[in-house]
Image (cartoon, coloured by chain):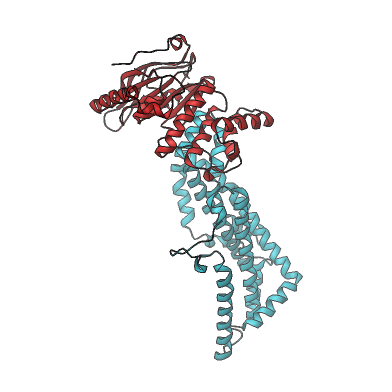
Chain colours: A cyan, B red
Amino acid sequence: MSEPTSPDGRSSFLDSKWLPWVTTPVLLLAMIATWQIYVSRSGVSAFILPAPMAVAHAWIDLLGSGRAWHHVLMTIYATLAGFAWALVFGVGLGTLIGRIRWLEATLTPFIVATQVIPKVALVPLFIVWFGFGITSKVIVAAVLAFFPILTNTVLGVKSVDAGHQDVMTSLNASRWEIFRRLELPSSMPYIITGMEVGIVLSLIGAIVGEYLGGASGLGFLLVSRMNAYETDGLFAVMIHMTLLGFVFYFGIGFLRRMLIPWHQSANM
Amino acid sequence: MAVVRVDPETDKAPVSVQLSGVSKTYPTRGAPVQALSPTDLSVKSGELVVLIGPSGCGKTTLLRLIAGLIKPTSGTVDIVGTNLWRNNRRQGDAASEMGVVFQEANLFPWLSIEENVALPLQMRGSDKADRSRRVQALLDLVGIGGFGQRWPRELSGGMRQRAAIARALSYDPDILLMDEPFGALDAMTRDTMNIELQRIWMETSKSVILVTHSISEAVFLADRIILLSPRPGRIDSSYDVPFSRPRTTELQSTIEFQTIASTLRKRLTEIS
């Protein structure tokens, strides 16, 4: 692999892939420094905005707390379980809708309707139906991730190359062979893009579910910190949530490189 | 006008492809469009036939009808003596006598070159050892023996098209159907591929039906050139090309070659 070069032919640092590895920590430090300066100069109350060091301490406390790890595991479980359901139904239904014209015509109005409902508005209903336990969180996580996975799958199935279809026809492929050897692998980049959006929405769904009901998960922890006026602890839980989001997102990125190494997107 | 045949042997050869009254009409919102009027065509075993004509003459339609990629509106397509269509269904045993190469290589980007070539064998359930042996032999035949492990996107257009030819030959069909196979390649690569195709054809003794819009490609490759004319698509005339094989690039500068080429060009201009 050759180094990227600027128009005059010399290798330019501004074009290099190492750039974000330098700029990201620098910008992050600058933000924290600004935050620290603001807190010490303005004398703002620690209930409104705690100092970075106070947040850091609260976060380290959180890392050392076994109870907090239990909440983390509950949120991970709700997110992944909901995401798994969304994946199964999204890819399954998406494949059918992408292939069967009349099914698409029949279902599209309903799918659009379920999409335009602000889905978090359904959370209280799910709690009424499924209780304060983990089930209602799993369902919220599933409902939020379902739509992007479905639409991307439909797009993927519809984007199968006509020339590739000719090849399969000329090889006398059965319906199953066409699905397994052409439609599925060719839709894979689209499905993974849907998963990338979906996993983050699943996390949001799980957390919102935890806000409103039950006594476990990072969402619950966040609300209890708020009620206790522990703003530094609240920030610490937010850091946990953010890191969890990163882990999930990069987990899908890892899947992308495993499942579709042939695709351009796997090398970005 | 047609050049006299010099090789009487092939006239006795068994028939690979037999079209009787085959036509194709596409329904449109207005009047139906006849892409191909009723056509008879017979291709002998081992013959290299080139279909040429201006755009809209139905040459690609004709090839796709032979391949069974589209169903004829009327008439029958016989492949090595078997009717291609029965009860509205494409017959697998007739279809497996044909390998198709398209203008684009149409390799699956998620499979390596050797997996692409092995795909038809895999779908026929041949075992792994047999498959990899056959695939290596095919890659050697088409001249990309060392590239089996690569992704298609890592190969040049010409090499991808070689892989597509290997894939079409993998299950050893009697007939190779090629729809402007080198149309997307640059002129130099195209000349090389013509020579390579002639070599592969001579080594495998397949029947080849090839669609092109290049007159020199047609004269260089063909035993017989079928010229089609448009509106509606139909066979206009047919020309035998008597040059001995293997033909070389120098042949293209001979008077005989130029004579056939200019005859074709004149007729093409008249009917376009």
**Image quadrant where residue A49 sits:** bottom right
Compared with B205, B111 (above or below) is below
| Residue placed most toward the observer, A110 or B219 | B219
B267 horizontally vs A22: left or right: left
Q: Disc count in the image? A: 0
B61 horizontally vs A100: left or right: left
| Residue placed most toward the observer, A16 or B93 | A16
Residue B214, given in percent of the width and then of the height, sits at: 35, 31
Residue B38, given in percent of the width and then of the height, sits at: 33, 18
Residue at (50, 67) in percent of width and height: A12
Residue at (37, 25) in percent of width and height: B219
Residue B106, given in percent of the width and then of the height, sits at: 49, 37
On the question of residue A230 being in view, the answer is no
Compared with A249, B251 (above or below) is above
| Residue placed most toward the observer, A128 or A35 | A35
Residue at (72, 72) in percent of width and height: A63
Compared with A260, B93 (above or below) is above
Q: For the C terminus of chain A, which image quadrant?
A: bottom right
| Residue placed most toward the observer, B198 or B29 | B198
Residue A156, given in percent of the width and then of the height, sits at: 50, 46
On the question of residue A183 being in view, the answer is yes
